[in-house]
Structures are given as structure tokens and as C-alpha cells.
Amino acid sequence: MTTIAVPAQERIDYAATLSSRTKGFILAGVLLGLFLEALDQTIVATALPAIVRQFQGIDLLAWVSTGYLLASTALVPVYGKLSDIIGRRIIVVWSISVFLLGSVLCGLSGSMLQLVIFRFVQGIGAAGLGSTAFAIPADLYPPAERARPSGLIGAVFGIASIIGPFIGGFLTDTFSWRWVFYVNIPFGVLALALIVSQMPKLDSGQREPIDWLGSGLLLVTVVPLLLGLSLDKTRFPWSSPLIIGLFVVSTVALVLLLLVERRAVAPIIALQLFRNRSFAVVILLALLNGFAFLPTILFLPLFLVNVVGVSATAAGTSLIPQTLAVVVAAVGGSVIVQRTGRYKPILLCGLALAIVGFTLLALMPVDVTRWGVTWRIMLLGFGLGCVVPLLSLIAQNALDHRYAGSATANVQFFQQIGGVVGAVIFGAVVSALLSTQFSTRVAPAVSQLPPAVQRSIDLSRLRNGSSAQDAAGPSGAAPPVALATQITQSVAADWDHQRTLVIAALRDNNVAAQNELRANPETP
């Protein structure tokens, strides 16, 4: 590797000075680190039902992913600015190290709350991986050559999305859900070795001050908002002082953030970029895309496991066709745009397909088959695949080249913000609906069952996706027994016992059997 000596304030043109071989090694390390982050976003989804069953934590379900996304989203602009000042390599090394620490802690979690906290630690590391992955190709390649590395980044997300759910389901069913976190360790160690040995400092030469005040206000805007949305509304209603106070704090922080960013020398959120109409539309699309797409990935495995009745592995493999559809549509859409130079038709077609896909998913019957879910999410994947890869490209082309990095960071930031808010809102909706349905439908139905059957049903465990008899994990214990089977077996056992007593009382004139029959209010 060649060392390049330049004045302290001069921007290094790595695209012109680094060899193709060095660029290839750097890009490989970056893609491996990005793969680490992308894999963790999908591999955890299929393990969530098992995690909820073990910890009885459906109320914190959304925060297993939301805590991760909150940290990885809010810190993206901060990491981006730090990488400009102190260089990309140290940020990548730090980020992977923190991510691996969070992975180990997640695997050792002893409660749902601990898992949420350690996922937040993971998110702190993931923020640096995401921000540098999208910035480094712009350091290494001129604009005309960025299509290939951008395509590779999309391929990494596609591959991670394809194998993530399958690996997550396989590890959960075969070993334990804890292994979906431990599997990050070998990938992370390999990425660290490659980056430390091959990546130069990648110092941009910029010495702009970090907008710490803006960063702090951004966190104060986002965190109270998400807490207000996600807290249990049976304990903290929408009209409670706590919820109202959180929303007020978030609103005040947002106003202050806008005022500060207008005067900041190097703002975290560059407000002047939003004056460009094309850029503003792209940001809105990114926000809505994140809002709609992430909850689908998070909650479809729960639907497949608990409603369709498939295993965690099968739930993971059922999501693979959607990712394949995203990859195919992304590649095909990019080729069409490159040849025609027109974005709008592909965007409109993708949005239309996505709307149809979401509508069909919303109208699924309770007896839908696994294939019935699969073809619907494939249609959704084709629609989203046409939209997602074009957003950053449109944003970059809509602005002057010196704003390319900011444009890309803003697209990623608002897409992730949309995903976080969507996950919290839909998680709150799922939790609230479950609580309501259990109170109005399930509990009265259970009360009509024989007393012995009622005692065998734990409504709290049932609400979290399990029953009193299926708490055992994949440690060699008896396999879980379905609730319907439990009820059938219990009723049959009670009937057989009652029949035996009747025969003994009438045929054998058994006094004990006669007394037991008289004492049982269910005896006709």
C-alpha cells in the first residue's frame, strides 16, 4: 500500500491515487462489515417468536428491533461527520468492535429488557457501519464508476436478507435463538482483520466542527417520540401526563433543532437541501418506504408461526422469495433507468405494485396457507425493489456533487427513521389488539371450558405465543403441544374418567364412584 503525503487541509483524491487492487481490498472489507449489519437486521426476525416465548415479553417485542434501529439511525450523521474528520478506518474498526460486543451480550441476555438494552449497544456499532459503507465508495471511485460498487452494496443487502431469515430459523430450531447473535462473531473478526490490514485512514481532509448541539437535539427529538408511541397504553394512556410530556419534549426539541441547524456551520441535517423539490420528494418516499417495509419484515414471521402454524425455519424460508423479488426488481429497474435515463416510470410502477401487495397482505384470511403468504410478499418485493435502489441515486443527481455525501446520508437516515417509527407504531397496534382480543374473546371462551382444561391454559403464556405446556426449548425435551390438541386431550381424558365412574357406580354399585359423581356439578 502506498502512503500519500499531502498538506493537512488538502483533500486526498483516493480515486486517483489508490491502485485498483487496494480499492478492491478496501471495498471487500467494507462490504463484509455491511454484510454484518444487514444480516443482523433479518436474522433476528425469525427468532423473535422463540424469544417472546422464553421471556414472556411481547410488550417489548417491537423494542428488540426498535432499540437497535434507534441507535443505528440517530447516530448515522454523527459517525459520518466524525469519519470526515478523523478518517473512515478508525470509525469502521470501532463500529465493528462495538457491534461484536453487543452481539455477545445479546446472546447472554437473561430477560427481554436486557436484550433490548444490548440490542441498543449493537445499534451503536451498526450506525458506523452503515454510514461509512455508503460513503467509502464515493471516496474510492469517480461518479462514472460508482454504479458497480453501489450495485454490490445492494447485492450485499439482498444476500443478507435471503440467508438471514433461513439461518435465523435454522439456528433457533436446531440450537437456540442465542446463536443468531453468536453467528456474528466469525464474520466480524474476519471483517476486522481485512479492514485493519488493508484500509488506509481515508481522511477527507475536512476540518469542519462537529454539530454536537444538533446531534443532541436530534436524539432528544427522536427518543421521547418513540417512547411515547411504544409505552404500554393500558398503563400509560395517550392522555396520561407521561405520554403528553414525552410528545411535548420531542416537539420542543424538534423546533430547537430546526433553529440550530439553520445557523450551524456544518449541520447534521442540512435544511437547505430540502429546497430542492426532487430531493424533498425522495426524502418523503424514503420515510414512507421505511415506515411500511420494516414492520412487514418484523411481524410476518410472527404471523407465519402463530397463525399459519409453520416452524421458525419455515417462516424464514417463506421470506426468501420476497428478497429475491427485491433483488430482481432492483437490478432490472437499474438497467432500465441506465438505458433510458428516466426514473419516474420505474418509481410509479414500483409504488403501484407495493400498494397492491400491502393491500393483499392486509386482506389475508386466517386460514391462509404458507404459499398464500409467500406470493403476496413476492409481489410486494417486486414493488419495493423498483423503488429503494433509485432513491439515493436520484438524490445525488438532483444536487451539486459536493452534496453527494449529505444527500445519501439523509436518504438513509430518513428511511431508517421511518422504519423505527413504523416498527413502534405497528408493534403498539399488535400489542393493543392482542390485549383487547384476549379480554373480549379468548378469556370468555376459556371460562366455558371444563375446570381441568381451564387450569391447563395460561392466558399470559398464550398471549405471548405459547401455552402452559410448550415452554421447553430445543434442548431435547418433549416437543410443544398445540393448544387445540391440549384442549382435545384434556376433554377426552375428563370424559373417559367420567364414563369410568358411571360404569363403576351403576354396574358395580361402587359407593366411592357414586359419591364422586354426586359431588361433581358437571354430572348430568
Image (cartoon, rainbow, N blue to C red):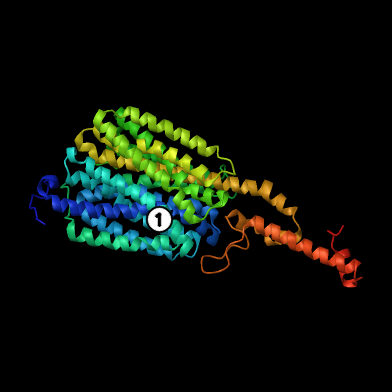
Left or right: 164 in relation to 277: right
Res 190 → quadrant: bottom left
Residue depicted at 42% across the width and 30% down the height: 352
> Horizontal and vertical percent for residue 273?
28, 33
The residue identified by callout 1 is 120
Q: Quadrant of the N terminus?
A: bottom left
Q: Is residue 500 above or below residue 40?
A: below
Is residue 49 among what the camera can see? Answer: yes
Is residue 210 among what the camera can see? Answer: no
Q: Is residue 106 above or below residue 5?
A: below
User: As drawn, which residue projects farthest toward the front?
Assistant: 507
Q: Is residue 151 above or below residue 281?
A: below
Query: Of 317 and 24, which appears nearest the observer?
Result: 317
Question: In the rendered structure, which amino acid carries the disc numbered 1?
Answer: Phe
Res 334 → quadrant: top left
> Horizontal and vertical percent for residue 12?
12, 47
Q: Quadrant of the C terminus?
A: bottom right
Left or right: 190 in relation to 367: left
> Horizontal and vertical percent for residue 116?
45, 57
